[in-house]
Amino acid sequence: MDQERTSRNSKLGKSKACLNCRRRKVRCDGKKPTCTPCERFIGGGLHDCEYTETGPAQSQVLEEQISIIQSRIRELEQPSEKTSVGLHNPYQSSHRRGSSFDEFAPGPSTSISRTPILQPHSPELFKTLMNTFLRHSSQVGFFLNPKMFDNLSNGAAPSQIACPALLDAVYLWGAHLSRSAAISVHEASLLSNALHSATRGLSSDSCPNAIRQTIQAEMLLAQYFFRNARMLEGKYHASAAVSIVLSSGFHKIRSAERPVGPISPAPNSLNEGESINAFWAVLTLNNTWLAADGSPRDVSSAVVDTPWPLDIHAYSQEPELLPSHSNSTIESFLSNVSDRGTSLVALHAKAAIAFEQASRLARFTENIALQNPETLATEFSNLEKVIVALGRLLPPLEQNGSHSLPLVIHSLVQVAIIQVHNPFVFKHAVSRSRSLTAAMAVVKFVRQTNLSGLEYIDAIVGTLWMAACQVFITELSRPEYGPTGTENHNHAKFHEAVETLLAAMSAFAGDCRMIELQLETAQRNYHAIGNP
């Protein structure tokens, strides 16, 4: 049988080999999810192979997207040298069959008209939508300088301040966050406007910051869809944002290497700061949600040289905080090398990276343990040290604070610890103990926060708090917590912990479909072990 399998694999056609083997010109055996040569080459098989017999691989599609966007950016930079490649319209059917981007395209239920359905011409309506959005802008991933909107109070037209893609995304979020039924009733129409404008984001020749503003618009759309549990559409817009930041060279800002993108160095510190923050905001969003969804990441840690982000106002007030040159930013962080990344946005990015790394390691623990147990032990130990060190850097929570981002960051770090130890909780007492400690830390942070004072919270907490809930539910389902068990002294404490997290999710579920779904899952799991 082994000889037959070897013979069959040796005759595997080139077209059926994985993308890595074809590029490296190595004979592939076609094993899925990871072929044998790739398992050996990458020391444990931390990434699934990509096969193209059913259509282009995800990396190929991303590379094509980058190429198309680079062409459009060159047109914006050098309008006299038009290229023959136009901006790809993600909302129309692809001219290729089998594109992996097809699955992210909105379905027939999403109506996108050629002309906007609703425009908030009323100055009062615009002001209301804008002010509602700006109150929460830093918490929904708004990386641009919010002072860009100050001129509106001096009579400037919105079109003089921002491109349509960004304005429509802001209007959408303003309606989504509004407590007024008279405004929120327009949310569906504003979504259609935002989707329509996003298709032409890079075509705004009159907009001086079309690239950064288009990235911002795509990010806001991705956040909106994730919040509403529309994962495919969220991932599509997140991928669009990734494509633009990479093709613009935002991952190589202040790199010791030569910049790879078509964008020339920023003319002032604030513009450069917006580009830096754009990259990290996109990476944070991408890492957080892809890890939660179990999808492979789109940005390799090895290619990132951009320095850690600062608060947007620090770039003009304290430009000396940025290093003159930067390289291997994420790799240095994952090697526990100290750095200057201590701003809240930098800590958020680090927490998202730690969460993604921990989730990835947890998914592939069994494969690595079988192939190379020494690699697993090293990766496990190194990553745990990084996460613990990051946790020590986080500022304490403000009990009556109105911003939810610190709570989100603390939750990300603790759930990263849970993820690292999760594969071992039934085998090793140390992992079981550390997982419980991390889950109790999440409960402590939730109890320390005045949740009623938070008008908005990132939808990812639904996933994070459900993971913490599951730690306690798993413990309570163990035999030792039964009527004659040996762990009854912790029984009430763990029940109270679950109830605390369920109540916290309930507080936000009414405004967030994603949190509502995670709450329902956690409640089902809790009821399954005999609780009302």
Image: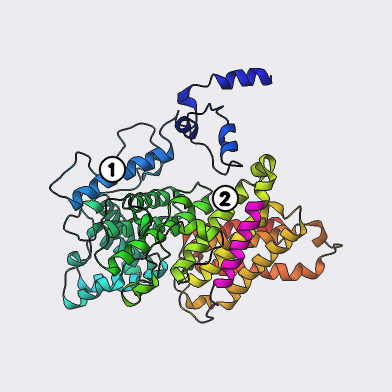
Above or below, 400 against 508 in this view is: below
Residue 102 occupies quadrant: top left
**Tag 1 and tag 2, C-beta contact below 8 Å:** no
Above or below, 177 against 51 in this view is: below
Q: Which residues, given as a range, are shown in magenta?
A: 378-399
- Residue at 63% from the left image edge and 60% from the top image edge: 384
Q: In which quarter of the image is the N terminus?
A: top right
Query: Residue 230: where, in percent of width, then height?
Result: 44, 52
Query: Residue 11: where, in percent of width, then height?
Result: 54, 18
Q: Is residue 308 left or right of residue 315?
A: right
In the rendering, which numbered label is found on residue 360? 2
Q: Is residue 208 left or right of residue 366?
A: left
Q: Quadrant of the C terminus?
A: bottom right
State how far apart marks 1 and 2 are (Cα): 30 Å
Q: Residues within 10 Å of mark 1 (few under 14, many from 20)?
A: some
Q: Residue furthest right?
A: 484
Above or below, 454 against 194 in this view is: below
The disc, 1 or 2, on the residue closer to the chain's N-terminal end is: 1
Q: Is residue 136 highlighted in magenta? A: no
Q: Residue furthest bottom?
A: 400
Q: What residue type is labelled 2?
A: Arg
- Residue at 38% from the left image edge and 58% from the top image edge: 279
Task: Say how many tags the image has.
Answer: 2
Identify the residue under disc 1.
68
Q: How is the image coloured?
A: rainbow
Above or below, 456 against 113 in this view is: below
Q: Residues within 10 Å of mark 2 (few under 14, many from 20)?
A: many
Q: Is residue 18 left or right of residue 8?
A: left
Can residue 253 be seen here? Answer: yes
Q: Is mark 1 on a helix, strand or loop?
A: helix
Query: Residue 409: where, in percent of width, then height?
Result: 52, 67
